[in-house]
Amino acid sequence: MSGRDALLVSVGRSRAEAEPWLASFAARLPHLDVAALGDPVAPERVRYAAAWRHPHGALADLPGLRAVFSLGAGVDHLLADPALPPGVPVARVVDPDLTARMSEWVLLHVLGHHRQARRYRRQQAESRWADDPYQPAARAVRVGVMGLGVLGIDAATKLKVVGFDVAGWSRSPRDVPGIACFAGAEGLDAFLRRTDILVVLLPLTPDTAGMLDAALFAKLARDGRLGGPVLINAGRGGLQREADILRGLDDGTLAAATLDVFEREPLERESPLWRHPAVTVTPHNAALSDPEAVADLIAGQIVALERGEPLRHAVDRARNY
């Protein structure tokens, strides 16, 4: 490689997985050497790093590092690295393509529970013709979105357009037109009491880790039109207690669950979540990052930094998001 400044890219378990990212960045940043983790690049030349679940310690000992970019919506994978350089800013991805994909996934599964898609798939397998004449309208179903960041606000707004009675909860107060907003510990119980379908798009932080547990599920609405509360989690697997989800499904605290994220990924083959009749599993693909779209955003950030502009979407390390 030349003696130019470099961008270090860490994604996937093999160079083949990294290749689309390397090509996308190289096309947009011709003034930088774009290197994969393990390539022969001098540590002092690395000015930027773009990573998704990098090996801990891989970004240490880079004395010229100016910024670290997440290649996905979350940053918990970066902040969990105890060797992440403390003085280097970390930026998250705010990508309209990723946001739209997440809202598509949320709408798909909220509507699936609302319109009883699982029941009709089961009836089709049994060649059984049966309908429910008392199926509620969307306006009679209360959807609660936990996490009113960019993803949560977009999903909540689109659910509202479909006709659902939508509310949102966040750690700090938000004001979203047309959405009833609750905030903080003092607003959580009231939010849960009016929620039939709980959509979770929270970041993983020390405060949110494990909060989707039996105590929280017990506070969800018991008077809804769907036969019981539904959990939909596309945030982070570390938010949930899977043993409590299974227990809640079996004792009636929860009527159903759709999960895109898990405590351990990939989800182990022996996990009972795969086979539970009230669970839908998707393989952490609710909102995949598109290398072309994300490289556009990060390249723009790097060029702006080099013009002396401030880093956008920087993470507050004290708050972990």
Image (tube, grey):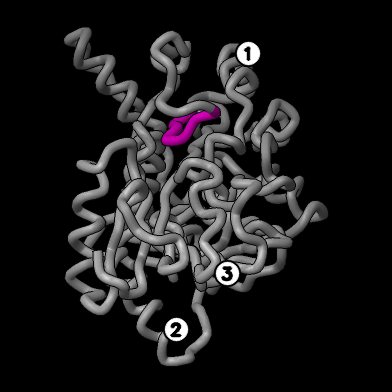
Residue 76 image position (x, y, % from top left): 57, 49
Question: Residue at position x 25%, y 75% from top?
Answer: 29
Q: Are marks 1 and 3 in contact (CB under 8 Å)?
A: no
- Decide which of 311, 214 is in the foreground and name it: 311
Residue 201 image position (x, y, % from top left): 52, 50
Q: Earlier in the sequence, mark 1 or mark 3?
A: 3
Which region is colored magenta?
257-263
Q: Are marks 3 and 2 in contact (CB under 8 Å)?
A: no
Label 2 sits on residue: 305
Taking the image as shown, residue 166 lies to the left or right of residue 157, namely right
Tell me the CA gap for discs 2 and 1.
54 Å
Quadrant for the N terminus in the image: bottom left
Count neighbours of disc 3 (C-alpha within 10 A) and say few if under 14, some if 14 to 19, many if 20 or more: some
Q: Earlier in the sequence, mark 3 or mark 2?
A: 3
Residue 171 in magenta stretch: no
- Decide which of 183, 304 is in the foreground and name it: 304
Label 1 sits on residue: 251
Label 3 sits on residue: 89
Question: Residue at position x 53%, y 24% from top?
Answer: 255
Quadrant for the C terminus in the image: bottom right
Mark closer to the observer (1, 3): 3
* Image vertical order of residue 276 relative to residue 286, above or below: above
Tell me the CA gap for discs 1 and 3.
46 Å
Type of the residue with mark 1: Asp
- Decide which of 314, 177 is in the foreground and name it: 314
Count neighbours of disc 1 (C-alpha within 10 A) and say few if under 14, some if 14 to 19, many if 20 or more: few
Taking the image as shown, residue 170 lies to the left or right of residue 50, namely right
- Is residue 176 visible to the viewer in this orientation of the structure? yes
Type of the residue with mark 2: Leu
* Image vertical order of residue 309 relative to residue 40, above or below: below
